[in-house]
Image (spheres, rainbow, N blue to C red):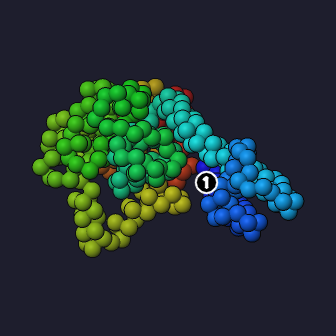
């Protein structure tokens, strides 16, 4: 809409300039000097109402009538679209800001991504695929101008008021992914102070920063360069295994997927063993590992492995198989 208005303004200015040029040439042919002809043209099309610079002949009067009809309409059109552009730009931005604020206020369990760089964009894209609500925070308006499809806030992500505006009290997670480790450290401290139970993932550029970020309250610290290097090395050492895991984790068109499912307190899977649940037989999903509330992993759980409330099942299967397992893990009365 704004782009179209700019085109209309440019068109109006071009037409107005053309009419001024034609009017000036016309009055010069009627015997006016160059300056007088321009002056007469401008006063005519703007309906100022000053007297004629030179007496007009019949031909001059006819020419002036035509110039008034063409010039006044063009001048009014240019002025109208110019004002429309100013009003639209001001109120359009205000309306867009209000829409995003209302959208953020409606979010529950969303993820706040601090930093709209390459890492932040990749995170937001993956979260969108997983249908997780995202709020972007960045202090650079030029970077934010490329945000599409996500509500955003312009400001310093370490500022408590900015984090509150992003709904940190209702958020499920915070990602500190700005360009500097110092910035991510302050964001982590601010986020942890505002919401003690918040899950925080922080980006670290230097290896020495990881311990500091963990002490500041980050639940997980990620070094994108280190992970990228490890992944490249894995393709060299175990290419087939790495590609399989990559496809399962990231290819949304593949039927087989990996999921994590937490066992609820009133789930029929709680307080029984893997063998008693007959998960494989009943759902088709395969439990690869179980994580206990303390963070420990039980890999390749056997039939005698007990499942308790709060355990997280790491399972692989098709969408329907995993949906059946999720129903059993989360809802009372479901049958595994």
Number of callouts: 1
SS at circle 1: helix
At 14% from the left edge and 41% from the top edge, which residue is drawn? 212
- Say which residue appears at 74% left-offset and 56% top-offset: 54
User: Residue 334, percent across and down?
Assistant: 55, 33
The residue located at (47%, 30%) in the rendering is: 108
Asked whether, in this view, residue 253 is left or right of residue 68, the answer is left
Residue 219 seen: yes
Residue displayed at 48% across by 60% down: 251
x and y percentages locating residue 264 in the rendered image = 43, 30
Of residues 47 and 227, the one nearer the viewer is 47
The extreme left residue here reads 208
Q: Which residue is labeled 1 in the image?
A: 6
In terms of depth relative to the viewer, which is nearer, 293 or 81?
81
15, 94: nearer the viewer: 15
Q: Is residue 308 above or below residue 202?
A: above
Can see residue 269? no
Residue 299 position, x and y percent, is 30, 49
Query: Is 247 rendered above or below residue 178?
Result: below
Nearest the viewer among 16 and 24 is 24
Q: Quadrant of residue 99?
A: top right
- Left/right placement of residue 73 relative to residue 150 reads right
Residue sticking out furthest to the bottom: 236
Q: Is residue 277 left or right of residue 219?
A: right
Label 1, residues with CA under 10 Å away: few <14, some 14-19, many ≥20: some
Q: Give the image location of residue 180, x and y in percent.
A: 22, 48
């Amino acid at each position: 809409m704004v782009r179209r208005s700019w085109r209309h303004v440019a068109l109006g200015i071009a037409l107005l300039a053309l009419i001024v040029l034609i009017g000036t040439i016309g009055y010069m042919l009627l015997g006016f000097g160059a300056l007088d002809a321009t002056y007469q043209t401008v006063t005519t099309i703007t309906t100022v109402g000053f007297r004629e610079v030179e007496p007009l002949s019949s031909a001059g009067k006819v020419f002036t009538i035509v110039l008034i009809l063409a010039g006044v309409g063009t001048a009014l059109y240019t002025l109208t679209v110019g004002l429309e552009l100013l009003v639209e730009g001001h109120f359009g931005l205000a309306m867009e800001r209000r829409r995003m604020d209302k959208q953020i206020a409606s979010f529950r369990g969303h993820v706040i991504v601090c930093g709209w760089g390459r890492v932040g964009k990749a995170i937001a894209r993956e979260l969108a695929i997983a249908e997780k609500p995202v709020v972007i925070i960045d202090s650079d308006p030029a970077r934010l101008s490329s945000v599409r499809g996500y509500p955003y806030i312009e400001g310093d992500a370490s500022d408590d008021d900015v984090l509150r505006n992003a709904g940190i009290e209702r958020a499920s997670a915070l990602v500190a992914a700005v360009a500097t480790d110092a910035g991510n450290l302050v964001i982590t401290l601010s986020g942890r102070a505002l919401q003690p139970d918040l899950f925080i993932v922080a980006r670290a550029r230097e290896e020495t920063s990881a311990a500091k970020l963990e002490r500041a309250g980050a639940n997980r610290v990620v070094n994108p360069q280190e992970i990228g290097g490890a992944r490249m090395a894995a393709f060299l050492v175990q290419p087939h295994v790495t590609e399989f895991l990559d496809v399962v984790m990231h290819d949304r068109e593949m039927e087989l997927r990996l999921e994590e499912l937490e066992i609820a307190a009133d789930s029929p899977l709680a307080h029984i063993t893997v063998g008693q649940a007959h998960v494989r037989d009943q759902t088709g999903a395969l439990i690869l590992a179980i994580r206990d509330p303390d963070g420990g992993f039980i890999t390749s759980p056997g039939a005698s492995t007990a499942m308790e409330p709060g355990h997280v099942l790491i399972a692989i299967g098709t969408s329907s198989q995993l949906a059946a397992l999720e129903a059993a893990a989360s809802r009372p009365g479901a049958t595994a």
